[in-house]
Amino acid sequence: DLEGKSLSNSLSMPTYASKSSRELEAFPSPPPPVSTQIHPLYSIQTSSLTTAKAPTSKVVEGLTHSQGSIALISALLSGFAFQALTTLTVEYSDLDSDFSRVVYILFIIVTSLTIASFLYVAVSCSLLEQNGLITRSLALSSKTSSNFDVHIENWYFKDQKFVTFRHRLIHLFTSSFILFSLFCSLFCLVRVDGPAGYASSAIFFIFGGIMTAQVSTINARFVEGILNNA
């Protein structure tokens, strides 16, 4: 009886056919989980991330790269002043009043100083940017000595004459905005007649004073908040 019941149960239970090769290809089984490993640099240990420092060559490259923007602005403003000076159609001999002659002389002097100061800043900052890029490239070279970062630090940070030169270069750049505003103000007096010339000259003069004060404030806050704490 028991054998008959088990036989009947086995016959009554449904049977399932095994998957064919086509079904396996159409519906493959999911791949086994891949074991992932986290790189030590990106691990949860935040202490290693906070204490990691970039190489000195990379820091110098970033600092000198900012000089490129200063060089570009200086070259642009110097070109404006040079174009105004060389395309000026007013001659000194054509002026009939002492005031006009004094303004003309002041315009020539201020414009020449503006061109010279901005050109000096543009050329110097361009060389600084190139030096930083070359320094970074040499630091990545396999032929460079292992203590190359020490030489970079001595050159850029510990040479007080070089540090003072860069500080004076930035001060000259910001001070040149005063000359450029005076150049614009005097140009209006030379080229524009009547009340319109005086009005435009006053606008450039006032704007130059406001811009100079604003630039000085921005630099002072940056030095106090960032550079002194670096």
Image: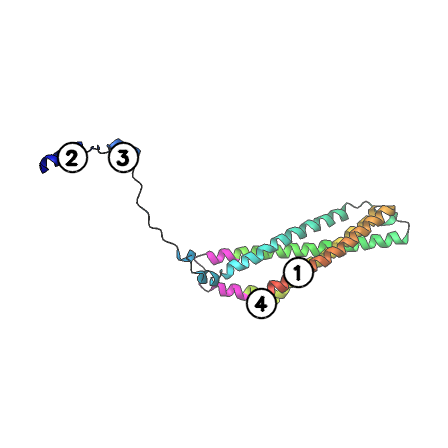
Question: Residue beneath label 3, please?
Answer: 24
**How far across and down, in percent of the image, does residue 12 sit?**
17, 32
Is residue 14 found left or right of 104 in the rendered image? left
| Vertical placement of residue 7 versus 171, above or below | above
Cα separation between marks 1 and 4: 23 Å
Quadrant of image for the N terminus:
top left
As rendered, which of 142 and 188 lies closer to the eye?
188
Question: Residue beneath label 2, please?
Answer: 9
Q: Which of marks 2 and 4 is nearer the N terminus?
A: 2
Q: Residue at x 49, y 65 (%)?
A: 150
Q: Residues within 10 Å of mark 1 (few under 14, many from 20)?
A: some
Q: Do the residues labelled 3 and 1 touch (CB within 8 Å)?
A: no
From the image, state whether disc 1 or disc 2 is nearer to you: 2
Whether 143 is among the magenta residues is: yes
Residue extending farthest front: 1
- First to last magenta residue range: 135-154
Cα separation between marks 3 and 1: 70 Å
Question: Residue beneath label 4, please?
Answer: 159
- Label 2 is placed on what type of residue? Asn
- Label 1 is placed on what type of residue? Asn
Q: What element carries label 4?
A: loop
